[in-house]
Image: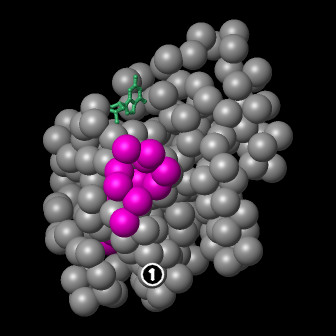
Amino acid sequence: MELNLHKSKFLTSAVNAQGYPDHDLKEIALVGRSNVGKSSLINTLVNRKKFARTSNQPGRTQTINFYQVDYLCLVDLPGYGFAKVPVEVRHQWGSMIEQYLLERPNLVGVLHLVDLRHKPTADDVLMANWLKEMDMPHILVATKADKISRGQYQRHAKVIRDSLQAEPLLFSAETKEGRDEIWALVRHLSQN
Ligand SMILES: Nc1nc2c(ncn2[C@@H]2O[C@H](COP(=O)(O)OP(=O)(O)OP(=O)(O)O)[C@@H](O)[C@H]2O)c(=O)[nH]1
Ligand SMILES: [Mg+2]
């Protein structure tokens, strides 16, 4: 079913289950390292520049943010693996993400974002394995494709494929490459 993007709105931010919205919407969550482009991807999906907060500073998104888009809900999670965040805060974020992914009944699928330019980190591998173990439907997205020349796409995609055992969908928030495919897959996930 097509989505009406005009029916997009920020719902709420939460740091624990008490703060999650009380609704029946199916949720698709975005996970990935800090600064990988989770919030930017949400903005690209809804065709708005400042819908989800983005920043050059890794660690911008520090809460779980819920965005309604018509009949479904996109969930922007804090990024993992940012070394400059104090270790206690990292543990807090880790448990925030984990609790959401493990316990949220509305969750029907996950977009796992990695940076097309870089070899996946140990945290990326952990997340990929965890999603598989949990049998969580998920889509692997390689972001910032505009920063790589097309001639190098396959070489970079192979590094990700070899490391995470999945084919990444290439995406750019700058050029909007991959946007329509992601929407099609997200709609598909929301039918689960
Ligand atoms: N060139 C380019 N820059 C991007 C792209 N996506 C995101 N960025 C930039 O990368 C930086 C981080 O983007 P965010 O969307 O805030 O990243 P995030 O994953 O939400 O980060 P946290 O909230 O810290 O976890 C910003 O400066 C964005 O403009 C992209 O596809 N291409
Ligand atoms: Mg963010």
What residue is drawn where x is 27% and y is 59%? 62
The quadrant of the picture occupied by the C terminus is bottom right
Q: Is 80 one of the magenta-colored residues? A: yes
> In front here: 186 or 35?
35
Image quadrant assignment for residue 181: top right
Image quadrant assignment for residue 56: top left
Q: Is residue 82 visible?
A: yes
Write the start and end of the magenta stretch as one range. 70-88
Q: Residues within 10 Å of mark 1 (few under 14, many from 20)?
A: few
What residue is drawn where x is 25% and y is 89%? 18
> Which residue carries the number 1 mark?
99
What residue is drawn where x is 37% and y is 24%? 174
Provide residue 151's location: percent of width, then percent of height.
69, 10
Q: Is 25 one of the magenta-colored residues? A: no
> In front here: 187 or 27?
27
Q: Tell me if residue 141 comes above or below residue 4 in the rendering.
A: above
* Residue type at numbered disc 1: Gln
